[in-house]
Amino acid sequence: MTAPRAAYLHIPFCQRRCFYCDFAVVPLGDHADGANSGSIAAYLPLLQAEIAASPNPAPLSTVYIGGGTPSLLTPRQMEGVLDGLRQRFGFAPGAEITLEMDPASFDRPRLEGMLALGINRVSLGGQSFDDGVLERLGRRHRRQDLLQAAGWLRQALAAGDLASWSLDLIQGLPEQDLSHWRQQLRQALELEPPHLSVYDLIVEPGTVFERLQQRGQLPLPDPDLGADLMDLTGEQLRSAGYGRYEISNYARPGHASRHNRVYWSGAGWWGFGLGATSAPYGQRLARPRTREAYAAWLQTRAASQPAGRPPFDEWLMVGLRRREGVNLERLARAAGLSTADCTSLHGWMALWRERGLLLVEGRRWRLADPQGLALSNAVLRELLAWWDAHQPQEVHLAESPIASSP
Ligand code: SF4
């Protein structure tokens, strides 16, 4: 197999932890920044050491620097990180280098400094244009910060200093109704982001939102309203010229994220940093989520843990969510399913197709848009239950049935 050409770097620092977030994050306080934080200064050499020790380097085509809030780093600190990658791997011509940036965590000179380093794509964590909602989410920024940051990105795009940018929004928030969400989408479209990521709110274990939900203080939209919100998103963005290339991701022509496609294609990627997951050569590896454990893991490499499940279920899930779908026969064969189990899986999929939730074109299966995408969690949950009951003991996947053509 060829060496991965994609890398994810995790910068785990945020000023505060948002109420819905269960990422591997180290909150540093509202005034913390790469320029004044000893925690950030202490972390970067560990990250550099892991990059430098990476085996089998090949030039990278995509890099995604996520977190956390990577825009807390100064351009000088980011330069050191990129130099580490450049020295170990090199960058392929035209490499897509994405930086996650949160409104209110950077100013215009910092953005310009980042772009001067070769970062050519920015993912802006806007989430909402409603100050009340941002407050209830535990976000630090406000609508005005978001508008200002988006304005800088638009100018950089127009000047040719930036190849693309994306805006993140969250739908299905407490007390959200269709009218509120329509307003949010309208404000997002006014900013003309070339790419939009629209995520459903998920209440994760251990978060403030989970505690509120347990106390009955988190009035989330019911499933019918949740499906209507998703339909509205699809309609509004489609009519504004965005293609839905993955369940949560919409892009104008030429602006789909190449790095995102790596995750969903089944091709491998490197991962670096506390809490990051890598998957080179089909081997998933989740790094420890605390600074101490990550530092110890770097020392010994013994505390590394496989992420658990073999990739059949993951490839099935990501493949069904993509417009290109997944070649089911190839996937089942590669996973070592018996002929009887392949027949059983096909029968099961055919039932969902009859209900209008799955489509098959050639040999490639995918969730129907919009019915299947709206009920994707239910479909995928049952699929994974089927897999749990049928998976062989040993699984060896040598090639990606998602990336290959039929
Ligand atoms: S800014 Fe992002 S990574 Fe940081 S706590 Fe909030 S949601 Fe999590």
Image: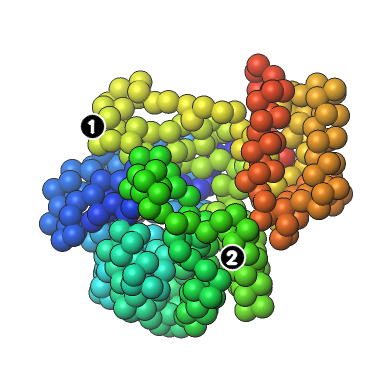
Placement of 23 over or under 392, stated as above or below: below
Give the quadrant of the C terminus: top right
- Residue 20 is situated, as x and y percent measured from the top left of the image, at 38, 51
Can residue 209 be seen at all in this image of the molecule?
A: no
Q: Where is residue 389, by image quadrant?
A: top right
Does residue 178 appear to the left or right of 161 in the view shown? Answer: right
Describe the element under mark 1 as helix, strand or loop: helix
Does residue 403 appear to the left or right of 66 in the view shown? Answer: right
Looking at the image, the residue that sits furthest to the top is: 393
Q: Which residue is mark 1?
A: 292
Give the quadrant of the N terminus: top right
Disc 1 marks a residue whose amino acid type is Glu
Does residue 122 appear to the left or right of 252 in the view shown? Answer: left
Distance (Cα) linking label 1 and label 2:
41 Å
Q: Which residue is mark 2?
A: 229
Q: Could you tell me which residue is drawn at 29 percent across and 68 percent down?
A: 141
Q: Quadrant of ligand 1?
A: bottom left
Q: Where is residue 104, by image quadrant?
A: bottom left
Q: Earlier in the sequence, mark 1 or mark 2?
A: 2
